[in-house]
Image (cartoon, rainbow, N blue to C red):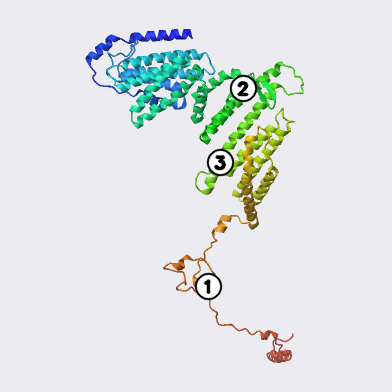
Amino acid sequence: MTETKSNDSENNANIQPTQQPSNTKNDSSKGPESIYTIPLLKLIKEAQQQHGLRHGDYQRYRTYCSSRLHRLRKVLHFPQGDKKGFKKREVTLDNLKDEKFVYLPLIQAERAWGYAMQLKQESNTEPRKKFHLVARLRKAVSHTIHLEYICQSPLCDARTKLEAQAYSAWMQGTLFFELQEWKQASEKLVLSQTIYEKLASALNEDEQILYKQRVEELNPNLRYCAYNIGDSSAQQDLLNMRSKGGKSELDVLIAQTREKQAASLLEVTWRGRTVPVRLEKIRVFLLAFQALDSSMGKANDFEAKLSGYETILLDCKEAIQSLKEDLAAVAKTKVDVQTPQLGSQQYLLSYLTFLRATLTIDRNLVMVEVFKKNFAAYQSGESKKVAKPQEGVKLYEAMVQLSGELQALQGIENDKKFQNDLELLVKVFKAFRCYYMALTCQGNRQWAEALALYQRAETYINQTEGKKLGDSEFTKYSRVGQDLVHLRSLVNSGKCAAHAQNILGVEDINAAMSGLTVRSKKSLSLRLDEFVEDLSLTTATPNVIKLPPTMAPVPCKPLFFDLALNHISFPSLAENMENKKSTGAGITGFVKGLWGWGGKK
């Protein structure tokens, strides 16, 4: 630290020659031609959002700053050298003829800061780049100090001077923060925050937003500085800030805080057995897990809770992965020895796996609450956002699988109380899963399948009725068991509806019921023997009789058919028919014989 301080003092000493008091006198004697009003913070934020920092691309922002500097020097005819060589030219009070000259040290500071932030991202995998990071921040500080000196000119108004002071203090606080000089960092950041607060109170509502955001951005760093200085309450403040709306930088600060506390966490006790904790990542995760309940209690909405669970689950997965790698490395060097009891690190792995599964179940239960709320609003028509029962099936299916993984954990196979509670929890989750599967089948008009699933859900409910979770690890899920009473009523109503639809065999029950109505459209003259509620009878146009009356069928003239003819037996006329035939044959023979044709030859 002593070496970095000396370097910082040397850099500050190198900056002093640019502050020429003689120039100040000469400039003041000339008198200001015009007053410059430069909103530095607004210019910086707009440039950052438009050129890469919206996505965290510091290299793109640094490239933009370099190009902007080149264009500015060309427009201002203020190059640094010529074709023969480089000649450094600094902006002084004498050549401050245009407000764009103020942009030069500002953009130079932003370029150095952007490069430092890029190196900070890369230093996670290459620690040596931290030295380059500090050097770039020192360069940025030198430019901001020079900017502050230039803005003291009478050509700049009070707002520009204050913004330059706040920007310079913020940059110096950032440097001291990286150097872990907490007291100096806190002083500079407090100075910057105070100036921005005063500026926000003096501006209109539209411009206040940006400065208030900057004040809020400084709070996590200030609380972290206070914690390192000795304020024990600062860590809880950091956790509360993340629960309200965490950022990546705040997560880094919290991780650094927990790493310092992790040195005191050397062992953990689970289900009556104490095992040592050797790896740093596991200690950091266990500390975060201990503070989870308090942070979840202060979460205001479902989004904050889900964000907290996602963060802790990510830490848990990293801890499990590091322990597995450590166990694999130890297995290569050690000879396998059969022991009746599970090894301490294997038991620790089972504990971490248990925490990962239970945390995932907790997160899924929060997601189930969100789903139930959206599903009820969608069914009632209050919300147009589509919520399908398949989402509930997926959530409960995942919880059933996680419960199955817990039953197969090593080291607790013979724990009957643990296994009995897990079995009870699995049946509860299966009951809800069957219910939402039945709703899915009803939506697809599969009435028989829906009825079978309702009956299966009722079976699971009957099996869990009257039983309670007794193990301390699962008492937090007792509320899920209490919801079975409401689930039973839903299952009974759904089962009756599915059974009726299955018997009716109606494909679309809604379309079939839409044609039915309680009120009759018949006129009073046609329903004198029926009582039907008809509000039109008390109005000016009562429905008494329809005029003109509708066409009605009337009886026509009867047709008579002679059916007795079929039952009368007439006398035989066969003899008369034969006489006629014989008479006809004689005359014919006579004619044939007379004329000589028709005879036999």
Q: Which residue is mark 3?
A: 371
* Picture layout, residue 69 above or below residue 466: above
Quick check: 90 left or right of 431? left
Amino acid tagged 1: Leu
State the residue in front, 463 or 324. 463
**Picture disc at residue 282:** 2
Quick check: 40 left or right of 337? left
Question: Where's residue 150, x and y in %?
Answer: 32, 16
Looking at marks 1 and 3 on the same chain, the residue that comes earlier in the sequence is marked by: 3
Question: Where's residue 386, x and y in %?
Answer: 53, 44
Quick check: 251 left or right of 42? right
Q: CA distance from mark 1 to mark 3?
A: 54 Å
Query: Mark 3 falls on what kind of element?
Result: helix
Looking at marks 2 and 3 on the same chain, the residue that comes earlier in the sequence is marked by: 2
**Picture disc at residue 317:** none
State the residue in front, 225 or 120. 225
* Residue at the image position 51 percent from the left and 30 percent from the top: 243
Query: Mark 2 falls on what kind of element?
Result: helix
**Picture disc at residue 528:** 1
Amino acid tagged 2: Ile
State the residue in front, 312 or 194. 194
Quarter of image, res 427: top right
Looking at marks 1 and 2 on the same chain, the residue that comes earlier in the sequence is marked by: 2
